[in-house]
């Protein structure tokens, strides 16, 4: 069994959807795919994508990203959208809960970002046009969104074998380039949360997969390997041909 990482599929781009459809239906039948969020905000397309991936992989694990929780032209708030995504996963046989596959624990961690995430960047403002501010809706009782998601994740359990956790958002600011290298200068304010790091450490993760920044990454920090393999937007790939990343 092999484990592959992928995030930020953004299948609303026809090119990305075609790439997903072109994944071999034969090669990965014994393998696990981790999808670390940002598939699309369109629920019926999420279903179509998951059905396609489930035909190609033994198991598919998923956590929603910010785009998946956008509420556009539909009823309800982003937590109801989360429930709708759970139903889509149940229907297509995609895992959103921790599970053991051939002695490897795979741990999806729901998450959000906090503006206090990156100590290098505190004094900037997020543009009001930031999509999440327009399209994410939260119930009044949800004030600190990263804390809410952290609180609904399952309590860690002990395990002896390899543990692979994943989240859409970044668990550590070291996984983001300094703001001088970023095109979107407010990204550090909407990128991650230290609560993710706390939870992946509590699970004893050896590898953590993340997404969101659309910047490929592979780095070891304090004994954990952190990996991002985004499909990203076609214009961001700049000639880099998209591929799945084998992490185990
Ligand atoms: Fe994304
Ligand atoms: Fe994202």
Image (spheres, helix red, strand yellow):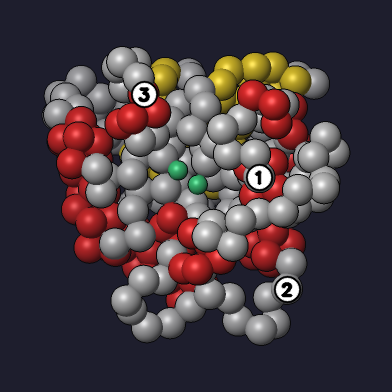
Ligand 2 closer than 8 Å to label 2 CB: no
Kindly identify the residue that appears in the image at 24 percent across and 43 percent down: 13
Report if residue 213 is visible in the image.
yes
Ligand 1 closer than 8 Å to label 3 CB: no
Kindly identify the residue that appears in the image at 37 percent across and 83 percent down: 75
Kindly identify the residue that appears in the image at 33 percent across and 78 percent down: 74
In the rendered structure, which disc, 2 or 1, sits on the residue that comes first in sequence? 2
Q: Nearer the viewer, mark 2 or mark 1?
A: 1
Q: Which residue is mark 2?
A: 143
Whether residues under marks 3 and 2 lie with C-beta atoms below 8 angstroms apart, the answer is no
Picture coordinates of residue 156 (x, y %)? 70, 49
Q: Label 3 vs label 2: CA separation?
A: 35 Å
In the rendered structure, which disc, 3 or 1, sits on the residue that comes first in sequence? 1
Q: Which residue is mark 1?
A: 186
Q: Which residue is mark 3?
A: 237
Mark 1 neighbour class, 10 Å CA radius: few under 14, some 14 to 19, many 20 or more: some
Q: Secondary structure at mark 2?
A: loop
Mark 3 neighbour class, 10 Å CA radius: few under 14, some 14 to 19, many 20 or more: some
Ligand 1 sits in which quadrant?
A: top left
Picture coordinates of residue 128 (x, y %)? 59, 62
Drawn side of residue 39 relative to residue 226, left or right: left
Instruction: State the mark number for residue 217.
Output: none
């Amino acid at each position: 069994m092999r484990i592959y990482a992928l995030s930020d599929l953004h299948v609303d781009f026809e090119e990305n959807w075609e790439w997903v459809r072109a994944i071999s239906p034969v090669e990965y039948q014994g393998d696990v795919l981790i999808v670390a969020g940002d598939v699309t905000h369109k629920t019926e397309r999420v279903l179509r994508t998951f059905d396609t991936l489930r035909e190609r992989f033994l198991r598919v694990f998923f956590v929603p990203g910010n785009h998946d929780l956008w509420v556009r032209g539909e009823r309800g708030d982003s937590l109801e959208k989360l429930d709708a995504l759970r139903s889509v996963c149940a229907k297509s046989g995609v895992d959103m809960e921790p599970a053991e596959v051939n002695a490897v624990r795979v741990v999806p961690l729901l998450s959000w970002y906090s503006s206090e995430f990156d100590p290098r960047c505190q004094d900037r403002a997020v543009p009001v046009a930031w999509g999440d501010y327009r399209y994410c809706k939260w119930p009044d009782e949800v004030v600190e969104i990263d804390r809410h998601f952290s609180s609904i994740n399952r309590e860690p359990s002990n395990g002896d074998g390899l543990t692979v956790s994943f989240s859409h958002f970044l668990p550590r600011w070291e996984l983001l380039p300094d703001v001088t290298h970023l095109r979107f200068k407010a990204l550090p304010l909407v990128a991650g949360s230290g609560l993710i790091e706390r939870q992946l450490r509590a699970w004893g993760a050896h590898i953590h997969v993340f997404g969101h920044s659309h910047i490929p990454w592979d780095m070891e920090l304090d004994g954990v390997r952190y990996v991002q393999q985004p499909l990203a937007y076609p214009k961001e790939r700049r000639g880099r041909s998209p591929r799945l990343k084998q992490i185990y």
